[in-house]
Amino acid sequence: MPHDSHDHDHDAHALLPPDPALWVKALETLLSRKGYVDPAAMDAILEFYEEKIGPRIGARVVARAWSDPDYRAALQADPTATLAADGLLGRQGEHVVVVENTPEVHNVVVCTLCSCYPWPLLGIPPSWYKSDAYRARVVREPRKVLAEFGLELPEGQSVRVWDSTAEIRYLVLPMRPSGTEGLGAEALAAWVTRNSMIGTGLPERPA
Amino acid sequence: MTRVHDMGGRYGDGPVDPAPGEPLFHAPWQRRAMALTLAFGALGRFSIDSSRFTRESLAPRDYSRFSYYEKWIAAVANLALACGLVTREELAGAPVAEAPLDPKALRPAAVEPALRRGSPSLRDGAAPRFAPGDAIRTRLPARNTLVEGGHTRLPAYAAGHTGRILRRHGAHVLPDSNAHRLGEAPEPLYAVAFDAADLWGAAERAGDEVILDLWESYLSPAEATT
């Protein structure tokens, strides 16, 4: 069996300056001087994730599923094709499964091995999602972790924790709250918080 | 032998800080770190599986003390060296002659199409051996059977347990192979449900489940326990 051939390359970062801001600067300069990275493309990447992508995209999917039974059925039957038809897939969201909360089951998403997250639907992951505490604990003690988010589940509801170990990205479809009857698509989407689509929160009345 | 990233079920990490209202980035360097990682990845010299393996191969002391984007940047440096794109001397600050932009380098106009396209891992592959409802047992110990100490996506906490097939995802690139440039080796991928009481000895509440996406070679048939 071959040994891991990269073991001697695991400390290259130690050659860089100790401060992370200087590391990044040094690497960006090195890789762009060598022609592997175009700094203008880096600017375009940032513009894309800062201006065009974020949890409002997922919120509109949820709001539409709440108000359109056919769309909701399509999201269950073939979520990837349904989202692709509206151009809602992309990097780190190439394959998607939508998991529905019910009075019996509450869904929570994690990636214990790294930080896999549905970027095209929710944007850049929050720090807590990438934290050791969340990754280590939510699979073993989901209710204690949810309580730290202020979420107490009712007695009769079981928990399903989805550990994103492959390239399938999970979006939680929370239950539609009372008080939202008759709302239009945009007003409904305003109730859908980012955390409610990960499972660490519920929809909330907009402030 | 395990690696430090495989932390599911670990004790001692303390409370989660939900940090409502958090900005997208906490410092300007984090923005550049994210963009540099994605732009460098788009060059196509290494797969996302190699990239993940490089991050999880950081020394445990570095993995634990580095913030998220520091791990990313450390992995960019290690990948650049492993792929032969830079030398140790250059990383240490030796002067570098300016080279023309690589034809494969990501250009600004290509950024949005590339990010909207992504890199799907679904492939044509063998018909799945298991069907929803089937009982399976996961490999024990969790390990890469192709490369000693190599990449795998079977977490240690789910190794050697009995679960049931919940859903078939089609055939997907096998990270255990692809991370080490041994080919994509696509295999059927399944969502597999495990009883939390079985994984942890005792569940927080009876009936709770943990679901993982697992490749067929991680699984063998089992007698249903219930």
Image: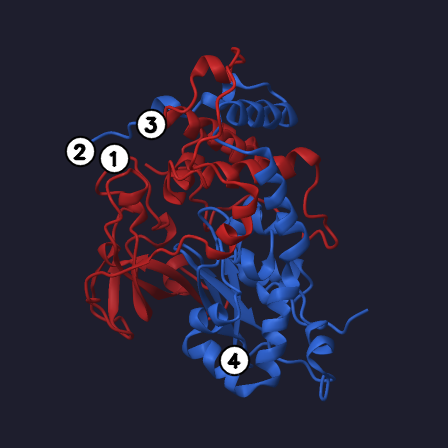
- Residues marked 2 and 1 touching at CB (< 8 Å): yes
Residue A80 percent across, percent down from the top left:
44, 69
Question: Looking at the image, do the residues carrying marks 4 and 2 touch, with CB atoms under 8 Å apart?
Answer: no
Give the secondary structure at mark 4: loop
Are both tags, 4 and 3, on one chain? yes
Chain holding disc 4: A
Quarter holding the C terminus of chain B is bottom left
Color used for chain A? Answer: blue
**In terms of secondary structure, where does tag 1 sit?**
loop
Question: Which mark lies nearer to you, 4 or 3?
Answer: 3
Q: In this view, does B193 lie above or below A127?
A: below
Task: Determine which residue is flagged by label 1.
Answer: B148
Q: Which shade of the palette goes to chain B? A: red
Q: Which chain carries label 3?
A: A
Under circle 3, the secondary element is loop
Q: In the image, which disc is placed on residue A6?
A: 3
Residue nearer the viewer, B100 or A36: B100
Mark 4 or mark 1: which is in front?
A: 1
The alpha-carbon separation of the residues under discs 4 and 2 comes to 48 Å
- The residue under label 2 is A1
**Image x and y of residue B183, in percent:** 24, 44
Question: Do marks 4 and 1 share a subunit?
Answer: no
B112 relative to A109, above or below? above
Query: Toward which corner of the image does residue B178 lie, by quadrant?
Result: top left
Read off the residue under disc 4: A104
Q: In this view, does A34 lie to the left or right of A3?
A: right
